[in-house]
Amino acid sequence: MKILIVSTLKRKVTPEVTASRSQIIYHIASGLVKKGHSVSLLGTADSNIPGVKNIPIIEKGWVDLPPAENPFLFEIATMVQLAKKIVEVQDSFDIIHNHLYPEFFTPLIEQELTKPMVTTVHVQATDYIDTTLGLFQKSKFVSISQAHRSAFHKASIYKVIYNGIDTTLFSLKQKEDVTGESSGYLLWLGRLSKAKNSDGSFMDPKGVKWAIQLAEETGNQLILSGNVEDMKFYKQGVEPHLSEKIRWFGPVSSEQLLTKEQVVELMQKARVFLMTVNWEEPFGLVMAEAMSCGTPVIGFNRGSVPELVVDGKTGFIVPPPSGTPESGVAAVEGLKDALSKINTIKSEDCRNHVLENFSLDTMVNEYEKLYKELI
């Protein structure tokens, strides 16, 4: 097949980039090339996927370009250019696979397309995303978990395909002795969002505050890392809690600057990975990556968490807070209880669960089957 993959313009796609959308694009394209397909990438000129032809729209991703006078207008302008290019080159391909951020922009051209287009929806199913995707009847939308799919009520989701991870990179390493109650460290990786609640407080969708509270109340070591979109959030909500036991690993930056190898090492050496999310997580690559390294996951029962974590076998699923102080106390107690049982989880069970369900081969094969079905 001749496949056109429409990339994000926010970032480049290379083996080194750790942002989840770029990773998924890279692995799908690479896997399709290995299966003998002809693959082209429509995106940034500095993207680099071996065996994939680049069709550049802009020189670099939005995050790597100098500030524009009006970022909103610049980003919309580049997306218009990309959409027009899809129409222009479509006859050279059998199918189009859209990963543009935001996903709902590219379907605007669906009536101009004579070739089928698949759009993987990476973002959370908010009301406004659901309403917007529901405007398009011809496009084929793919959700990345069953929970993600069930949150759409107006948009028509054609299929669910789980994301896959590189299980060779995220490999099992025998843990050092972590049988002691306080040995090992807790690990939290995520994004400190710019998003605000209606009262102006920090939304904290990835739930870093719950991880910090758990560590403070149990005396465990906690390593935090990720990308800081809102420095004020970091200064007010995270930095005051840092200590010898609670550490921020790596640069404090708007972009995730850790190498994949650094992330792997953090996961391999961790006692447990914390998925204390405050939102309906569409997938959560970090859960699969941690379990692939043999590290169990403790997560709130939100979004895809119960689809990725097998409660009692690859980690524990805890009832989330519901917004009241009482529910917050109960949620932390639930985290504590799960942590007290974490040594009952076997690393091999975590690893095997990912190999069986969330491998790159499984993801690529599912997309290949979908392409053939639509063609």
Image: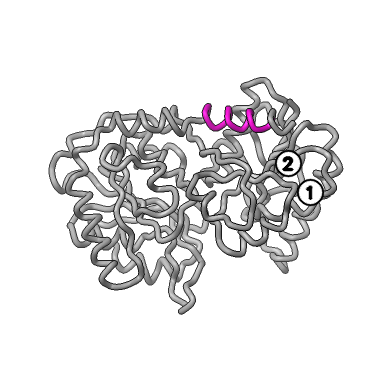
The picture places residue 262, in percent across and down from the top left corner, at 40, 40
Please tell me which residue is depicted at 53% across the width and 44% down the height of the picture: 144
Dominant secondary structure, magenta: helix
Residue that numbered label 1 is attached to: 110
| Quadrant location, the C terminus | top right
Please tell me which residue is depicted at 62% across the width and 55% down the height of the picture: 63
- Mark seen at residue 66: none
Q: What element does badge 2 sit on?
A: strand
Q: Is residue 152 above or below residue 283?
A: below
Crowding near the residue tagged with mark 1, few <14, some 14–19, many ≥20 C-alpha atoms within 10 Å? some
Magenta-colored span: 361-371
CA–CA distance between discs 2 and 1? 8 Å
Report the front residue among 191 and 158: 158
Label 1 amino acid? Glu
Asked where in the image residue 105 lies, by quadrant, the reply is: bottom right
Q: What element does badge 1 sit on?
A: helix
Residue that numbered label 2 is attached to: 117
Residue 267 shows in this picture: yes
154 vs 96, left or right, is: left
Please tell me which residue is depicted at 26% across the width and 41% down the height of the picture: 312
Residue extending farthest to the left is 180
Tag 2 near tag 1, CB within 8 Å: yes
Label 2 amino acid? Met
Residue extending farthest to the top is 36
Crowding near the residue tagged with mark 2, few <14, some 14–19, many ≥20 C-alpha atoms within 10 Å? many
The picture places residue 329, in percent across and down from the top left corner, at 24, 66
Residue 262 shows in this picture: no
Asked where in the image residue 28 lies, by quadrant, the reply is: top right
Asked if residue 285 is among those painted magenta in the image, a careful observer would answer no
